[in-house]
Image (tube, rainbow, N blue to C red):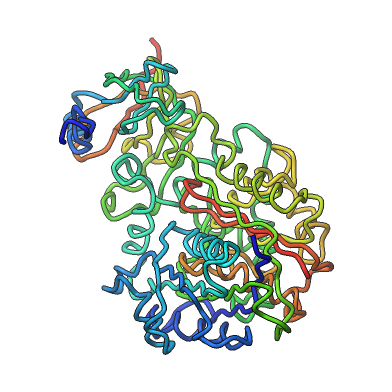
Amino acid sequence: MRETWVVGAASNRFGKMKESGREAATRVALAAIEQSGLQAKDLGYTFVSNCFGIAEHQAHVGPLINGGLGIPDVPSCTIESACSSSSAALHEAFVQVAGGFVDAALVVGAEKLSHLDTLAATSYFAIAADYPFETKNGATFPSLYATLANAYQSTYPTKPEMFGAIAVRDHENAAHNPHAHFQKPISMDTYLASPVIASPLRLYDCCPFSDGAAAVVVAAKERIGTPKSEPLVIRASARAGSITEMQDRPDLLGLPATRTAAAKAFRQAHLEPKDIDFVELHDCFTIAEVLALEDLGFFPRGTAAPAALEGVTAHDGKLPVNPSGGLKAKGHPVSATGASQVVEIFEQFNGRAQGREVPKTEVALAHNVGATGGSCSVHIFSRR
Amino acid sequence: MDDAIPSASHTVDEWIHGYEEGEILRGFRCTHCSLITATWGLACPRCGQRTLEEHTLGRTGRVVAFTILNVPGDEFLNDAPYAYVVVELDAGGRITGWMPSVKSVDDLTIHQRVHFVPGYKPGVQFAKDAPPE
C-alpha cells in the first residue's frame, strides 16, 4: 500500500443553506482542491455522498459536481452509508489511492433538508433504520438512541447532568468554530429545561437537522511533493458492520460495529487508544458519545458518562472530544458529517482552530456511525 | 435457473399484515444455532448458516428497554406520546414494537410484562398485562 495523505479539506458553515446540495458540494470541493495544491484534473476519481438528495429531486449528483468542477470526464461514484456516508467515501478513496489505482481522489458530502419541516425531516431520517421492522413499529432516530440510553441508564448509574455536560461542552466548542451550526454556548440549566423528545433524551441531547457540505482531497505521498498545508497521514481506514435491528442485538450497551472498526483501525495503525491525542466522534445524541468512548476503548464499560462532567473531554482536557462541537452543535448534515470530522482534524493539525485548540496534535481519530450502528468508520491520522 | 434462487414462505408485507391483524408474530428459528429472530432474512444473522425455518413467535414477554416518544415520524403523527419498546419474548427471541396506551415514563418500567395485541395500523403493538389478582 502507498502512504496516503489528506492534503486538502474544506467545509462551509453548517446550518441553513440557500443553495442546493449540489452547488454547496461543488464549492467546498473546489476549496479543498485549491488548498491541496493539486488541480481538479489531477483527480482520478470523485466519491460523492448525498444520502437524501432525493429530497431535492436529485440523484446521480456526482457527475453534475464533476461537471461543475470542469472535470466531466473523471469517474464519480455515489456512496451511501446513512450518517457515515462520507467517511465510507473516504475509505473508498483511500483504497483507490493506497492501492495505486489513482494518484488523487476527492471525497465530498453534502446534504440539504432545511426546505422540509421537522416532521418530514424526521421521517426522511427514519428511513435509514430498518423500515418494516423498526420505523413501522413507531421508531424514529431519537427514539432508537433513547432506547439505548434507557438500557444504559438501567445498567449503569447516570444522572441527566452527565449527558448535559456533553451538550454544554459541544456548544462551547462550536461557539469557536466558524463552520458550526450553533455558535452560542448553552448552560446546564438550559439543557435541563429543554423539552423531552424521546425519554430520556431532551432537545439538547439531539443533534440538529443541518444543511452543509464538506470535502477532503486525498493523494499519494509520492504524488504531492511539498504540500501546501500540513497533511494528515492516513494511518488507518477501517470499516465495520453489525446487526442493524435493535431486536436482534443481544447487547444494547454499545454498538458492535464501533468495536470492530476500532479494533481493525488500531491494528492497522499499530497504535492503542492511549496514543490518540484527540477524537472527533459520532455524537448524534449525547448517549452516542458515551457508547462510542467505551466502544472505542477509551473508557471501560459503564464509566464514560461522567467524563464530560469531569472535564476530561474538554478541548483542553486529557482526551479532547469533538473540539469542532460535534454533530450535536457543529451540526449533522448527514452526508457531510464524516468529511467534516476530517476538516476539523486538518484544521487542528494546521493551527487553524483558534479558541478550541487541543493541546497535542500528533495523532487523531475520527469515528462516524451509520444509523444505529449498522455501519461504522474509524480513521486514524498522524503527522508526517 | 429460478431453482437457484432461494424461496421465501412469506413476503415482508405479509409479515407486517400479520401484525396488523393481530393474528401472528412471524419469525425464524435457526436450526443450527437455535437463534430466534423476528427479522426477515435468508440466513441466520448470528451464525450465518442457511438454516432458518419459519417460526411462530410467542405473544407474551417483558420489556427490556423503552422510550416514550413525544416527537413521532409521519406515520405516527396522531399517536404521540407512545412507548417504543424492545421486548424479550417468553418463548424466545426479541422484538420491537410500540404501545399506544403508554403515555408517560411513569406508566412503564423495565421488566413490565406485556402481550401482543391486534393493531389498527401496521406495526407490532403491545399492551401491559393486567396486574396479578
**Quadrant in which residue A119 is drawn:** bottom left
Query: Which residue is more in the foreground, A179 or A195?
Result: A179
Residue A225, position in %: x, y? 71, 82
Identity of the residue drawn at 47% across and 59% down: A83
Identity of the residue drawn at 49% across and 86% down: A41
**Quarter in which the N terminus of chain A is drawn:** bottom right
Q: Is residue A295 above or below residue A369?
A: above
**Quarter in which the C terminus of chain A is drawn:** bottom right
Residue B124, position in %: x, y? 29, 33
Q: Is residue A79 above or below residue A253?
A: below
Residue A66, position in %: x, y? 40, 82
Identity of the residue drawn at 75% across and 74% down: A349
Query: Which residue is more in the foreground, A171 or A330?
Result: A330
A95 sits to left or right of B26: right
Query: Which residue is more in the foreground, A249 or A113?
Result: A249
**Quadrant in which residue B24 is drawn:** top left
Q: How many marks?
A: 0
**Quadrant in which residue A33 is drawn:** bottom right
Q: Is residue A134 above or below residue A357?
A: above
Q: Is residue A287 above or below residue A62?
A: above
Residue A88, position in %: x, y? 50, 59
